[in-house]
Image: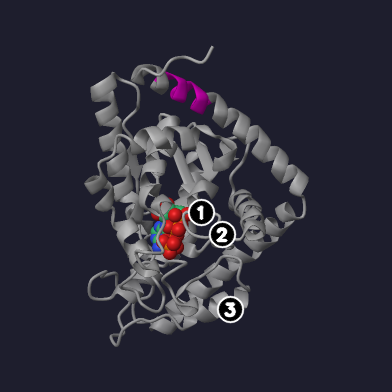
Amino acid sequence: MLSGIQPTAGSFHLGNYLGAVRQWVALQETHDAFYMVVDLHAITVPQDPAELRANTRLAVAQLLAAGLDPERCTLFVQSHVPEHAQLGWVMNCLTGFGEASRMTQFKDKSAKQGVDRATVGLFTYPVLQVADILLYQANQVPVGEDQRQHIELTRDLAERFNGRFGQTFTVPAPYILKETAKIYDLQDPAVKMSKSASTPKGLINLLDDPKATAKKVKSAVTDTDTVIRFDAEKKPGVSNLLSILSTLSGSSVEDLERSYEGKGYGALKTDLAEAMVEFVTPFRARTQEYLDDPETLDSILAKGAEKARAVAAETLAQTYDRMGFLPAK
Ligand code: AQP
């Protein structure tokens, strides 16, 4: 099991948490799990060095606050394991230019920046992601729906390499939970909640002031109907709120629909705002505790990098050998 998260946003948003990190916490109990903060991916767009450093520690603190346990999983920073960049180059040489050009995340992100400003790194970041996954021989990758195409690319490249050079890589599958595959913008429930595309009112950052979070929930866009029912097509706003509340409260969407029969949207929003505040208040406090102890954070990361490198180095050595690189004496 392998997954990663970018350190770019500062605070994780609700989509990151429900779509990915929450699953990471559950899966560390049942899988040999590798989780990383992907700083190499972060530099596909310009970064201020001091901010990147601070945001990387902040991302690690949030992952620990969310419940990752370094005794149960391998938690590390991508740049601490140079094999990522090394296998990334190999995978670049196996990827067709047209194939990489079809990645919709690149198209969306480069369109936002303007093609002339987009970097070659942004263009090939899905290929680096392929290397991230294959290095650990991961068979499952817990991600949100937006990453499905990249997992498909990973499968294609793993099969291509195995076909050409002999069985080397495990072919992974995406692990995407239907209920939280895509959390939508609270103000525009037709699009995913995203740090770069959402307006501040549509985006819930986990480290925001809980009062501001409650306010955003209460002003979420719904519809002119009054019935609380899950219908992603006709009632995207209400359905989004139901999905979020269902995951946070542990009640099924059907049970929630039943319990809100005859009640208005106000009741749903009030309960969701409460559930959010209940979740983010201790999360913020725990994140701060980890940030206040950078030595512990750094020692967790050092141990994580050591464990990750042991696996990554073995896969890379095997890959180089299969491709015909001379061994370094
Ligand atoms: N809205 C979402 N719903 C469900 N899952 C989501 N993820 C992101 N947004 C949603 C999942 O979060 C994990 C980490 O993603 P990332 O580090 O790549 O963050 P991101 O994709 O950069 O987040 P954004 O907000 O989507 O960034 P921009 O706006 O730059 O594209 C991934 O597993 C992702 O699927």
In the rendered image, the quadrant that contains the N terminus is top left
Circles 2 and 1, Cβ within 8 Å, touching? The answer is: yes
Q: Which mark is residue 42?
A: 1
Q: Nearer the viewer, residue 46 or 140?
A: 46
* Mark 2 vs mark 1, CA separation in Å: 7 Å
Q: Nearer the viewer, residue 271 or 15?
A: 15
Q: Which mark is residue 212?
A: 3
| Marks 3 and 2, the one that precedes in the sequence | 2
* Mark 1 vs mark 3, CA separation in Å: 27 Å
The reply to whether residue 256 is in sight is: no
Residue 101 forms part of the magenta stretch: no
Q: Amino acid at mark 1?
A: Ala
Extreme residue toward the front, this view: 116
Q: Nearer the viewer, residue 308 or 22?
A: 308
Q: What residue would you read off at disc 2?
A: 47
Q: Residue at x 34, y 28 (%)?
A: 170
Q: Residue at x 45, y 80 (%)?
A: 267
Question: Residue 8 location, x and y as percent?
Answer: 54, 59
Q: Amino acid at mark 3?
A: Ala
Residue range corresponding to the magenta coloring: 311-318
Q: Is residue 126 above or below residue 234?
A: above
